[in-house]
Amino acid sequence: MSTAEAADPAAAAADLVARAAAWRDEDPDPVTAAEVTDLLDGAAGPDLDALAARFNTRLEFGTAGLRGALGAGPARMNRALVRRATAGVARWVLDGRSTTATATAARAAPGGPVVVGHDARHGSAAFAEDAARVLAGAGLEVALFDRLVPTPVLAFAVTHLGASAGIMVTASHNPPADNGYKVYAGDGAQIVPPMDGAISAAINAVGPLSRVALADGDDPRIRRVGAEVVDAYVSGVAQLATSPEHRDLRIAYTPLHGVGRDVLLAVFAAAGFPAPVVVAEQAAPDPDFPTVAFPNPEEPGAMDALLALAAETGADLALANDPDADRLAVAFPTAGGGWRALTGDEIGVALGDWLLSRGAGADRLVATSIVSSSLLGRVADTAGVAFAETLTGFKWLARAALARPDLRFVYGYEEALGSCVGELVRDKDGISAALAFAELAATEGAAGRTVLDRLDDLARAHGVHATRQRSVHLDGPDGPARARAVVGRLVADPPASVGGLDVVGVDDLRAGGPLPPSDVVRLRLAGGRVLVRPSGTEPKLKAYVEVVVPVTGADVATARVAAEAAIDAVLTDLDPRLS
């Protein structure tokens, strides 16, 4: 829209209507084309507000790829957008094969196919098919999954098949109305800058959609893959097992209407565990997620059906994956008859400590993100192994391992229920994490203990590291700008103390340094820390608080109560600054 049009509402409306009509006329999907027609041809004239929501902004391609609500227009997820994005990815892959490619573009492995997979969300199958046809139309070989697959299986397939790149169609744990498009480089890890910039530039250079070559669905360059890749993944995960002698464990499990069930059950069978009992009403893939308000095991109520089944069957352990099975949630029965869900940090630290205890050598590496608990770093130091701290997201955690080929990567995690066990998958993997956690629980059970006992031992050794997250929704088109403004204010005018804990330092991560630049501010506290950042995938501002309280004698319970009270005080002071 020109400056003149912005000053002239009639001109702006005419421009909006023209752009919407032009988009509709090249839309390959009759459903979204009809959506635009209905908005253009209403009885009262064009619905300008609805059109503006779809056409005055667009989904930006970044390190998370694309993710958003399904619907028509460049601000929604749809087949036109997927075709255009894939044309850009194809250009990036081809540039990476060119002897004259720049260092920015040349990040795809030369020669191999592009592997494409999808989950069970609305539109996922059509998006994956369109992506495969665009890639083949550009002259690339494609390995297209012939079935629903979890995200970690797609990530595994990139390296297993020697692929140039990977595309996974999923919105992970987002609401049912959303879908997404995630890109992996040829090394099996998610793309990071400057790869995202190169792909985004290639997408922007795509001309009219009618000029994007589209192969037939049965084009010989499109090879269907399925059971053989899944079987290789299952075998690889089962081989990560370290304690095959301990399998006496009753497990309840839910895939939350997602695509994890069959692969997880196959992994547990291959590793010798009894079959977990599965929540029947959540067992089959269902893109509407009818039994949960929000298909994220972190959300209140999402695990209620699982915990009810676990109690009914006398389970020792309850496990949940999110819909694309890249995250793992865990709960244990308590002495009082209820169930206690572990936080992401508790899962991560327990698994990290456990996996380090199963091996030896200083040539090992564990990693976590800056918003996760600092406890894993202390565990690594005690074990005499290398430790890496990265920006938020597994795109960075995986690359911490790739950056140190001289070390054996043991484990990485982020507090949002993401874990990576070993080097089989270079992304978060809720299925291999589930197997590792089951082994941990079974081994502790054989010794008459629980994982909670192990966490208490870590608290006695290093202090209680209590963590909590606060999310503030910032809806509306100005949400991202408001979130960045909060970070800026905390840098420019930090409080002298938060919750009675002195602020002893402020780290402005926007400027970069040891880590790449990121919209994050860290307040270092006397006895803890606070990090604040905008979400990379949702209209939220996120704050992460950690408080460390030493344990006096063996009284872990008292230290935990004190730590939680300290976090309450910190958040009470912090909340007014987050809006």
Image (spheres, rainbow, N blue to C red):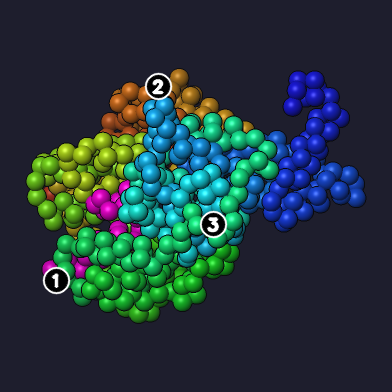
Say which residue appears at 31% left-offset and 39% top-offset: 399
Based on the picture, tell me whether residue 247 belongs to the magenta stretch: no
For image coordinates 80% across by 24% down, the residue present is 5
Q: Return the x and y of residue 102 as percentages of the image width and height.
A: 41, 26
Q: Which mark is residue 245?
A: 1
**Relative to 320, 556 lies left or right:** left
Say what amino acid the circle numbered 1 marks.
Answer: Glu
In the drawing, does residue 577 fall left or right of residue 410? right
Label 3 and label 1: CA atoms lie apart by 49 Å
Does 481 sit left or right of 64 as displayed? right
Res. 405 image quadrant: top left
According to the picture, the residue beneath numbered tag 2 turns out to be 511
Residue range of the region highlighted in magenta in the rendering: 418-447
- Going from N to C along the chain, the mark reached first, 2 or 3, is 3
- Check the picture and name the quadrant holding the C terminus: top right
Closest to the observer: 495 or 402? 402
Q: Amino acid at mark 2?
A: Ala
Question: Separation of disc 1 and disc 2 at Cα?
Answer: 50 Å
Query: Which element is circle 3 on?
Result: loop
Q: Is residue 439 magenta?
A: yes
- Quadrant in the rendering for residue 253: bottom left
The residue labelled by disc 3 is: 219
Element type where label 1 sits in the image: loop
| Tag 2 near tag 3, CB within 8 Å | no
Give the camera-side residue of 133 and 461. 133
Q: Is residue 394 above or below residue 306?
A: above
How many numbered discs sit on the rendered protein? 3
- What residue is drawn where x is 48% and y is 31%? 197
Which residue is outermost to the left? 361
Residue depth check, mark 2 versus mark 3: number of the one nearer the observer: 3
